[in-house]
Structure formats: C-alpha cells, structure tokens
Image (spheres, rainbow, N blue to C red):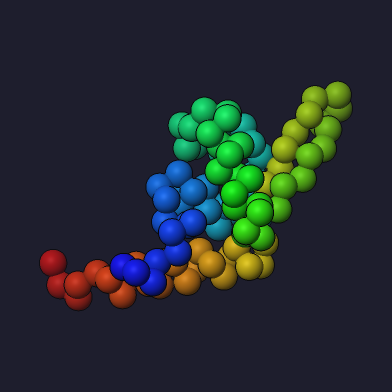
C-alpha cells in the first residue's frame, strides 16, 4: 500500500484519471457529471493533476461558449497504468 501514488489514489482523482484513460479527452462538463463533484472541487482536483504533469487542460471556445478540454499526458497515462498494476498486485489470487 505504501507504494501507491497518493495523488492518484484519492477517490475523486482516481475517478478522473480512470475516466480520462478510457478516452482521448473529455470536457469539464462530462467529468462534472461523471464524478458528481462540484465545479470548484473538480477544478481543484484538476489543478493538482495538472501541476503534477498528469493532465493537460485546454481552454477553448465552441462558437461563443467556453469549453475546457482535459486529457491525460503521456506521464499521466503511465501513472494510471502503474497504479492499476500496483492495485492488481495487492489483490489475492483467489477470493
């Protein structure tokens, strides 16, 4: 357990990272609905992940509407895959 990345293992950030690992990118509204977090909470978690170099955040406009697009960086993809591998090692072979 000590080898798990605490930044990723936090439940909200793990949900964000897992969602982003399944697609090339997701917008803020999609992640908001998927995680059930408040706008401020999601923004705070995304900022922590961005500062760690795990996600890339692109602010753009679709027509006149602002849109925030989030994707995993290569470092983020490696980090979430490593996290899953460590979790698999912690599981017993039989239940």
74 displayed left or right of 39: right
67 displayed left or right of 83: right
Vertical comparison of 41 with 82: above or below: above
- The answer to which quarter of the image holds residue 89 is bottom left
Q: Residue furthest right?
A: 63
At horizontal 53% and vertical 34% (from top left) the residue drawn is 41
- Residue 21, horizontal then vertical, whole percent: 55, 57
Vertical comparison of 92 with 24: above or below: below
At horizontal 13% and vertical 67% (from top left) the residue drawn is 95
At horizontal 57% and vertical 70% (from top left) the residue drawn is 78
- The answer to which quarter of the image holds residue 65 is top right
Quadrant (top left, top right, bottom left, bottom right) of the N terminus: bottom left
Residue 18 visible in image: no
- Residue 90, horizontal then vertical, whole percent: 27, 71
86 displayed left or right of 28: left
Label count reads 0
- Residue 15, horizontal then vertical, whole percent: 46, 48
At horizontal 24% and vertical 69% (from top left) the residue drawn is 91
């Amino acid at each position: 357990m000590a080898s798990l990345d605490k930044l990723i293992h936090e439940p909200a950030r793990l949900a964000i990272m897992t969602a982003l690992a399944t697609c090339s990118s997701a917008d803020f509204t999609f992640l908001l609905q998927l995680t059930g977090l408040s706008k401020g909470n999601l923004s705070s978690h995304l900022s922590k992940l961005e500062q760690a170099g795990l996600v890339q955040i692109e602010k753009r406009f679709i027509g006149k509407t602002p849109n925030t697009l989030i994707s995993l960086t290569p470092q983020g993809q490696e980090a979430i895959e490593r996290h899953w591998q460590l979790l698999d090692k912690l599981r017993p072979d039989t239940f």
